[in-house]
Amino acid sequence: MTIIKDDMGRLLDAGVKTLFYKAYETAPAQYDGIVTVVPSSTNSEDYSWLGALPTMREWTDERIPRGLIEHEFTITNKDWEVTIAVDRNVIEDDQYGQLKARISAMAEEARRHIDELVFELLASGFAGVCYDGQPFFDTDHPDGVGGTQSNKGTDALSATAYGATRAAMMKFADDQGRVMGVVPDALVVPPELEETARQVLNSDFYPETGYEHIGNPWKGSATLVVSPYLPDADDWFLLCTSRAVRPLVLQMRREVTFNALEGQSEGGFMRKRYLYGADARYNVGYGPWQFAYGSSVST
């Protein structure tokens, strides 16, 4: 089969581009449920507002606008790309199945990359700094009234530790000392803790020795997220994801786009290669620490 320039344009427009976006949209991803997607219009965005979420008060005289607490926290966008080279013979020999497989794999990689960024960010929260200048998971976040709060633990995952962590999160206050009413609903673990996590969340009876005939109060209390991008086999995380603002931010400057450089390119002319690529501009960062609790068992 002879491929001319018009045929190549038809091949791309009618099939490859559509294939990429379909594969990207249907690729499995876990980050959707734990991030706030924030559209970005500049190189970086300011998140000073994270320290002062609005609260209702009795209206007795005049409105009192809630000003922003003075925090400096920005997320700077980064550029990302993935590109493949396809030998011209693959297309000339009408081996569309090979091209289709490679384009689909590229789309899946673009989707997977966000998962990797998000969960690596979560895992690094014991050192990574959030809006109040403290590590995202820390033992002395200010509570706005002169005291401190902790969203960091060291207990191994168990039903008892899970219950204590839920209770602690429900008492978290904002930077003005007001209880936020946090209700955790997502348990995030590495693959090594999946069995223990499923016992905590799914067992009919309390999954600890000596309590085999007592009902499990935590059954169905959270969604389980098992991520291979959590490097420590013992660390685990409890998140509140039901609020308008979630514990992690995905800042999207430009969505993933697909492009092709075909036969008229230097690669096509000199090395009979066609180039297909995807690129995007985004980054991830920490949201309100009150919506997350991390247990670093090794510390």
Image (tube, rainbow, N blue to C red):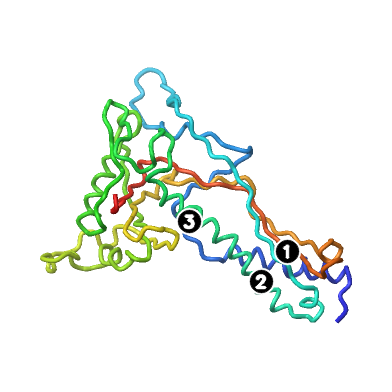
Q: Amino acid at mark 3?
A: Tyr
Q: CA distance from mark 2 to mark 3?
A: 24 Å
Q: Earlier in the sequence, mark 1 or mark 3?
A: 3
- Do the CB atoms of the residues marked 1 and 2 lie less than 8 Å apart? yes
Above or below, 89 against 5 in this view is below
Q: CA distance from mark 1 to mark 3?
A: 26 Å
Q: Which residue is mark 3?
A: 31
Camera-side mark, 2 or 3: 2
Could you say where residue 277 lies in the image, as x and y percent from the top left?
A: 70, 61
Identify the image quadrant of the N terminus. Answer: bottom right
Q: Amino acid at mark 1?
A: Tyr
Find residue 181 and report its image quarter: top left
- Do the CB atoms of the residues marked 2 and 3 lie less than 8 Å apart? no
Could you say where residue 299 lies in the image, as x and y percent from the top left?
A: 29, 49
Q: Which residue is mark 2?
A: 102
Find residue 262 and report its image quarter: bottom right
Could you say where residue 136 lies in the image, as x and y percent from the top left?
A: 39, 42
Q: Residue at the spot x=33%, y=47% of the render?
A: 293
Q: Residue at the spot x=47%, y=60% of the render?
A: 30
Q: Amino acid at mark 2?
A: Arg
Could you say where residue 261 lies in the image, as x and y percent from the top left?
A: 79, 61
Q: Residue at the spot x=22%, y=50% of the render?
A: 164
Above or below, 114 against 251 in this view is below
Q: Nearer the viewer, residue 32 or 96?
A: 96
Is 177 on the left or on the right of 281, as rendered? left
Q: Which residue is mark 1?
A: 276
